[in-house]
Amino acid sequence: MSLAVDQPTRSCATELVCHDCGLRLPLLDTTFKCLGCGQGLDIDYDYELAKTRLAELPTAERAINIWRFEELLPIIDSRAQSRVGINSGRTPLIHADRLGAELGLRKLYLKDDSTQRPSLSYKDRVVSMAVARLLELGKEEIGCVSTGNVGTAVSSLAAKAGVSAYVFYPSNLERGKARACRALGAAVIQLDGNYDQANRACRELALASGVQFANITLRPFYAEGAKTVAYEVVEKLDWRSPDHFVIPAAGGTLSSRVHKGLGELEKVGLAETAATKIHAAQPQGCGPIATAILDGSGEIEPQTPHTVAHSLAIGAPGDGALVVDAVMSRGGSAATATDTEIFEAIDLLGATEGILTEPAGGTTIACTAKLANEGKLGPDDTVVAVISGNGYKTLDEHPDKPWPEMVACEVEAMEKVLTGFRREGAASPLH
Ligand SMILES: *Cc1c(COP(=O)(O)O)cnc(C)c1O
């Protein structure tokens, strides 16, 4: 099929290309799996052209949103692009001096996607690409299968773009996120199965119904949004790529596309990124990627997830092999964290940096601590840990500490309680 694009973006995307066998298809083809070998499709760019176009437009004149480096993003129709993600991207990179002091890392930075807009997780980056592509194709309905945050991102971004959203959740969904989808006007369908079962069923539904799914049929475009994390971090560090990224992995899109984004910055001459290592963080109850890296086999064995980190509970990761390659080719590593360690890390991050993250972010911090302990992150290395989601969405999952008794509205009683607190020190994980 072909689309007439009379108002093109600056995108230098050229073709769809197979990760595995290298088969090439036109960018406007709606195939999402390689016709030859069945593997996922990727987007290729004219990097020489991108280098020229990137140099033409100074950074000061660039959009301060997800489209800032649109030369390296896959949307070619500016009318579609202008309707999505205008307030997405560009989250803070925070020097975590207080958390770093606890972990023995002087140059620890947090890429804080817990404040990502509109829906408070990194998924706004990838779903922005999917919805823009949907508009480019002239469609008005979008589906998705979600462990939690894809659903809220699709609901928000579809609402603003004026398209209908259908969100499919597995049976062990986080209720707060499903409620949010409804409040955002999406139809929510709960499926009787885990994420991997729901994912397979949704793929069949997408093919049978013709509805485009953000993270299935639109996947090659969706995945490109995750590269923006690499561009933003390296730009913020004055085009000096960090020594390490620690990235939470579920399906593996974020970690594999940060790898791709770093490689592209090198290709277009914006930064030297070859020395940057990527480390994958996973829960112990669902760590097929970390296991394949740590046992040295590189082979992903699917697992049945049992973890509080619902956002990371993908037992058969679609981009798992790409993450293994990203980590191993850069000399990085991996770590896993138990449920208890995840909640302790959430509290430690909260009490040191004032950032409340969900269990995925707790997994990242717990794994960062382990990697530092093992000497895989040096005390003076520049380390960027990605905080990918917001804890205000998942407080219902947080273990409830015993509540103090009710105190009378009366100064004497209140002073007594306060004196007790001051004697013990605050109930903080730092003491
Ligand atoms: C989806 C998600 C991830 C990881 O996603 P990938 O599938 O590996 O890209 C990490 N954290 C949060 C909060 C998420 O929602």
Image (cartoon, rainbow, N blue to C red):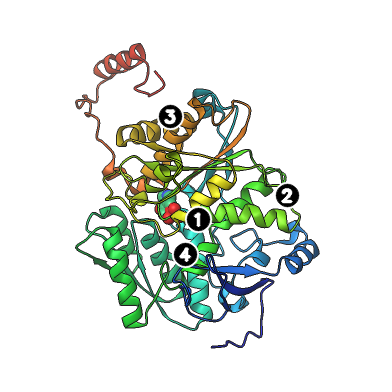
Residue 278 at x, y percent in the picture: 55, 44
User: Quick one: label 1 or label 2, which is nearer the N terminus?
Assistant: 2
Marker disc for residue 271: 2
Marker disc for residue 44: none
Residue 65 vertical placement versus 353 (above, below) = below
**Circles 1 and 2: CB atoms closer than 8 Å:** no
Q: Residue furthest front?
A: 297
User: Quick one: label 3 or label 1, which is nearer the N terminus?
Assistant: 1
**Residue designated by label 4:** 127
Residue depicted at 22% across the width and 26% down the height: 404
**Residue designated by label 3:** 351
**Residue designated by label 1:** 322
Badge 1: how crowded within 10 Å, few (<14), some, or many (20+)? Answer: many
Badge 2: how crowded within 10 Å, few (<14), some, or many (20+)? Answer: some
Residue 263 vertical placement versus 127 (above, below) = above
**Circles 4 and 3: CB atoms closer than 8 Å:** no
Q: CA distance from mark 1 to mark 2?
A: 22 Å
User: Quick one: label 2 or label 3, which is nearer the N terminus?
Assistant: 2
Residue kind at label 2, given as amino acid type: Ala
Q: Quadrant of residue 119?
A: bottom left
Residue depicted at 41% across the width and 21% down the height: 430
Tag 2, which secondary structure?
loop
Q: CA distance from mark 4 to mark 1?
A: 20 Å
Residue 428 at x, y percent in the picture: 37, 23
Q: Nearer the viewer, mark 4 or mark 1?
A: 1
Q: Nearer the viewer, mark 4 or mark 3?
A: 4
Residue depicted at 45% across the width and 43% down the height: 293
Badge 3: how crowded within 10 Å, few (<14), some, or many (20+)? Answer: some
Residue 165 vertical placement versus 341 (above, below) = below
